């Protein structure tokens, strides 16, 4: 076991079984960081750190991978090849812990990488499968429109940044459907708009912010170019100036066909064919697992963690987010099942929890 960074762990399990079959090296990843959210649940494992919460299920990810690591370590004599257990830091914070670990070589020699992410929108006992683009690209921006303030009774003497900002906000929504093909169109959301504080004063500036979620690199670049063209055109036409900052996020997670085929076969064994959910559309959230999928064939899938008897399912990043602990069993079985497929562990997933 090593610490590639201060808050990450890499554990390597090298099998002892000799075999004439191909010796695979596979990587399992669990992200382990929490979020700056005050937890509003009432469970035994509620966060002990005020204002910090595992609202994205990363504690569940770590628990599932730890369970698999324990089982597989106990069966080292039946393993040929190598299994790497990556407990990764900083998935929630750009530039992301994944890229840092890749730079440190955790994927060198790896044939496949696998990961699970909890979803509160599907019931326990199900796992969602998708090939191709799994998660979107996210680029955030902040925009400051600089006008000329003045008295609200004489707007003709001012350059109103609030009105200019409103026109930009509306125009941004129009370029999506008119400039980019419908099947590749990104999601553009203005999430911040502030300007002024007094009711009788036209302010000096307005501040907008938001995010662009894209599915491919070309659309990502075009979206940023079009947005800046709109901002530049409107501010110049109306006599204002602007300052714009971009925060470029993670690339898209792309699930490779062979890796997904392995995942699907295991999920059908673990959950049953009727509990495999085929996901038709990519998820427009982001994930730094993309750093792995850019380097090696990878498969990241959703695991359902909602117990219908518990009532409403709260979304990820919500202070009342909760998982059904019974779902952890299926995640452990998933990782062990993949090891069975590729490294000949021959550990029965049926008997894991007996």
Image (cartoon, grey):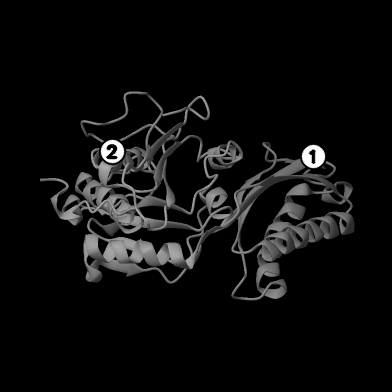
Nearer to me, 122 or 112: 112
The crowd level at tag 1 (other Cα within 10 Å; few <14, some 14-19, many 20+) is some
Q: What element carries label 2?
A: helix
Left/right placement of residue 150 relative to residue 292 reads: right
Picture layout, residue 240 above or below residue 149: below
Horizontal relation, residue 336 to residue 88: left or right: left
Residue at 22%, 44% in the rendered image: 325
- At which x and y percent is residue 156? 87, 51
Rendered image: mark on residue 174: none
**Where does label 2 land, which residue?**
73
Q: Can residue 312 be seen in this view?
A: no
Instruction: Pick the quarter of the image with the C terminus.
Output: top left
Please give the label number shown on residue 204.
1
First in sequence: mark 2 or mark 1?
2
Please provide percent x and percent y for residue 177. 66, 73
What is the spatial separation of the Cα atoms under label 2 and label 1, in whole angstroms? 64 Å
- SS label for mark 1: loop
Residue 207 lies in quadrant: top right
Q: Which of 264 and 302 is in front in this view?
A: 264
Q: Which of 221 and 270 is in front in this view?
A: 270
Q: What is the quadrant of the N terminus in the image? A: top left
Q: Say whether residue 344 is visible.
A: yes
Circle 2 crowding by C-alpha within 10 Å: few under 14, some 14–19, many from 20: some
Q: Which of 239 and 29 is in front in this view?
A: 29
Q: Position of residue 182 (x, y in %)?
A: 61, 76
The residue under the point 61% across, 39% down is 103
| Tag 2 near tag 1, CB within 8 Å | no
Q: Which of marks 2 and 1 is in front?
A: 2
In percent of width and height, residue 142 lies at 69, 45
């Amino acid at each position: 076991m090593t610490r590639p960074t201060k808050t990450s762990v890499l554990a390597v399990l090298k099998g002892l079984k000799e075999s004439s079959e191909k010796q695979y090296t596979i990587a399992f990843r669990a992200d382990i960081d929490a979020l700056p959210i005050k937890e509003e649940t009432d469970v035994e494992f509620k966060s002990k750190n005020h204002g910090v919460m595992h609202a994205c299920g990363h504690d569940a990810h770590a628990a599932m991978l730890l369970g698999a690591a324990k089982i597989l370590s106990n069966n080292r004599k039946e393993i040929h090849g190598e299994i790497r257990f990556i407990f990764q830091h900083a998935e929630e914070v750009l530039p992301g812990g994944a890229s840092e670990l890749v730079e440190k070589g955790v994927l060198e020699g790896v044939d496949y990488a696998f990961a699970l992410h909890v979803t509160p929108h599907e019931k326990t006992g199900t796992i969602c499968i998708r090939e191709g683009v799994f998660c979107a690209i996210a680029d955030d921006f902040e925009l400051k429109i600089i006008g000329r303030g003045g008295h609200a009774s004489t707007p003709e003497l001012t350059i109103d940044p609030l009105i200019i900002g409103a026109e930009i906000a509306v125009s941004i929504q129009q370029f999506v459907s008119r400039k980019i093909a419908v099947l590749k169109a990104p999601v553009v959301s203005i999430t911040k708009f502030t300007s002024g504080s007094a009711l009788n004063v036209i302010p000096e500036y307005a501040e907008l912010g938001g995010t662009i979620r894209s599915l491919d690199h070309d659309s990502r670049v075009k979206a940023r170019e079009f947005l800046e063209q709109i901002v530049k055109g409107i501010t110049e036409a109306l006599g204002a100036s602007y300052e714009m900052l971009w925060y470029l996020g993670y690339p898209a997670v792309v699930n490779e066909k062979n890796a997904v085929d392995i995942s699907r076969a295991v999920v059908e064994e673990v959950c049953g064919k009727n509990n495999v959910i085929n996901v038709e559309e990519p998820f427009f959230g982001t994930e730094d697992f993309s750093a792995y999928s850019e380097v090696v064939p990878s498969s990241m899938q959703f695991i359902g963690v909602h117990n219908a008897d518990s009532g409403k399912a709260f979304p990820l990043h919500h202070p009342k987010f909760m998982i059904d602990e019974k779902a952890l069993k299926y995640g452990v079985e998933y990782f062990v099942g993949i090891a069975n497929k590729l490294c000949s562990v021959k550990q029965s997933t049926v008997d894991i929890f007996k």
